[in-house]
Structure formats: structure tokens, C-alpha cells
Image: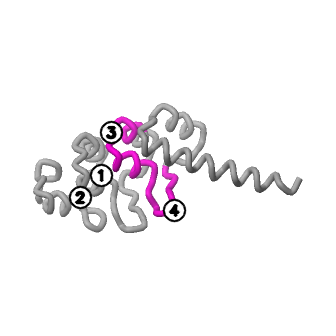
Amino acid sequence: MTDEPNDLAARAVELAQDMLDLARHGRTDRLVELVDAGVPVNMRDASGNSLLMLAAYHGHAETVAALVARGADIDLLNDRGQSPLAGVVFKGEDAVVRVLLDAGADPDLGTPSARATAQLFERPDLIPPR
């Protein structure tokens, strides 16, 4: 009987790790199946990176769109104050930038902001200067 809480905790940690990996690898179908079943759409890793942040950073526009459609916070900053939009501007993930901007992501949020990142990397096509 005393092992039951430990087993449950271990399964919860395993599920959380699986969710983060699904986001990183763009496994949209399985990820949204679990979110639709009740796993929090804004779940984060130990560094504060949300499922959306991980999917975005790894260039999975379809996964990002699916998470947005399920209520993911498009402007949720990680523990370093970085926004998903700034991360994808840095990576040059044009399709993901478009998904996030179309969803209303704030280009001036975070440190550095997506707008500042676009200027730094001379990508005004991604986030035009004000």
C-alpha cells in the first residue's frame, strides 16, 4: 500500500516528460489527445518552458496552432523572461512566427522582445519595426 503514492507520482512525472517530448517533436495528434483528456495546456518544464514554447522553438507550426486552438497562452514567458514569439524569431521559424502573430502574440513582450530580436538579426520581414 505504501508504494501506491510513489507509483502514482512516478507515472505523473513520466506523463509530464512525455508531454514535453511530444511538444518538442511535433507529435500533434497524441499531444492534443492528452490535452483534450485533461492535461493542462499550459504545462511547463523545470525552466518554465510551456508546451507551446517547446513546440514553437522546434519549428512545429501545426502543433503550435493546435495548442493555441486549445487555449494555450501565446505570451507565457519562461523563467528567463523569454516569449515563444521571440524564441521563434531567433530560430527563424517563419511559419511559427505567423501562427503566433495571427493568434495575437505580443511582439514587444519579454527580454529580449521578438521585435528587438528581429532587429538584431536583421529580419524585419518577421516583425516589422514600429
Q: Quadrant of the C terminus?
A: bottom left
Q: Please report whichever mark, 3 or 2, sits nearer to the chain's N-terminal start.
A: 3
Instruction: Let me know if residue 4 is in the magenta part.
Output: no
Q: Give yes or no for contact between labels 1 and 2 (Cβ–Cβ under 8 Å).
A: yes
Q: Which residues are magenta?
A: 42-66
* Residue that numbered label 2 is attached to: 114
Q: Please report whichever mark, 2 or 4, sits nearer to the chain's N-terminal start.
A: 4
Q: Residue at x 51, y 62 (%)?
A: 46
Q: Please report whichever mark, 1 or 2, sits nearer to the chain's N-terminal start.
A: 1
Q: Residue at x 22, y 49 (%)?
A: 92
Q: CA distance from mark 1 to mark 3?
A: 14 Å
Residue 105 — which label?
A: 1
Secondary structure beneath label 3: helix
* Residue that numbered label 3 is attached to: 61
Secondary structure beneath label 4: loop
Amino acid type of the residue tagged 1 in the rendering: Ala
